[in-house]
Amino acid sequence: MITKLAESLGYRVLDVRDGDGTLSIGGHDGASALRIDWRPLIVEGYTGSGSIDRFAIRTRDAEFRASLRELRGRLQYVTKNFDPVGLARPILGLLQPGHYGVRTWKDANVHIEPFGENGTAWWYPYEPIGTEGTAVIPTDSWPPRDEEMISRYVDAIEDGDRPLAVILRSEPPGDEQDCVAFLIDGHHKLAAYRRTGIAPHFLDIARLADRRPCKPDDLREVIAGDEKLKQSAANLMRYLEDRRH
């Protein structure tokens, strides 16, 4: 079923057997965790507060967050290779073994949800303005700080180039208006697309697995004992606890 969905959306389906697990994603959309070295960096899900709102919580461990920046040095690829599997190969080697879909997603409809107070991001799907399409969760500072690099990408995009930012999803999007993708690499590219008003292009990688939520311990680790976050995430935690067996 999930393989057919992926293929219908233009993903190339493949089996990753030799990934080292440095980068992994667990759960399903609405209850997923992005992990680095098997530790959760970000958990996203529904608040279950009575309104249809979603949120993401990022670990406040600054040293751990920096490990993702170091990881990006291993995500370089030749952008002239338009085969999505070839483009994704360096990233696939970092993923946990399993089945994945890979596609080049052109002219994407997305909104960006950066982290604010207390390492959280909140949004309401289906809002008429500002939250159309896939919610992209940055994994680094947003907006990015290197203005010179953004300007270089702006010039390239205005000249007709379409550089690919890299996103990772817990599953293929069943509803493009209410789903999440983590921005693994390409923050400056995405900022440049936003500045030009041109729809971004992505290298889009989706995990293909049974629809099981992420682990309760993933959420506990990013909350790190914060009482306010515990309260905000209480309904999601109950859902994860109920579904862990």
Image (cartoon, grey):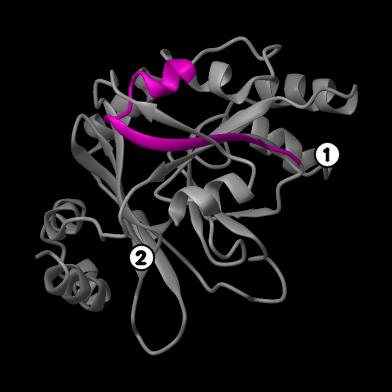
Q: The magenta stretch spans which residues?
A: 89-106
- Residue 174 at x, y = what percent? 53, 62
Q: Is residue 192 left or right of residue 74?
A: right
- Residue 159 at x, y = what percent? 90, 22
Residue 216 in view (yes/no)? yes
Q: Which quadrant holds the N terminus?
A: bottom left
Residue in the foreground of this view, choosing between 39 and 205: 205
Q: Residue at x 35, y 85 (%)?
A: 49
Residue in the foreground of this view, choosing between 38 and 105: 105
Residue found at the far bottom of this picture: 50
Q: Is residue 125 left or right of residue 51?
A: right
Quadrant hosting residue 196: top right
Comparing marks 1 and 2, which lies closer to the viewer? 2
Residue in the foreground of this view, choosing between 231 and 101: 101
Q: Residue at x 82, y 27 (%)?
A: 157
Dot 1 or dot 2, earlier in sequence: 2
The residue that mark 1 highlights is 196
- Checking the image for residue 166, the label placed there is none
Separation of residues labelled 1 and 2 (CA atoms): 31 Å
- Residue 35 at x, y = what percent? 27, 39
Is 133 above or below relative to 8? Answer: below
Q: Is residue 93 left or right of residue 62?
A: right
1 and 2 marks in contact (CB < 8 Å): no
Is 103 above or below relative to 83? Answer: below
Quadrant hosting residue 223: bottom left
Residue in the foreground of this view, choosing between 51 and 244: 244
The residue that mark 2 highlights is 45
Residue 140 in view (yes/no)? no
Q: Residue at x 60, y 25 (%)?
A: 84
Callout 1: SS? helix
- Does the magenta-highlighted stretch encompass residue 102? yes
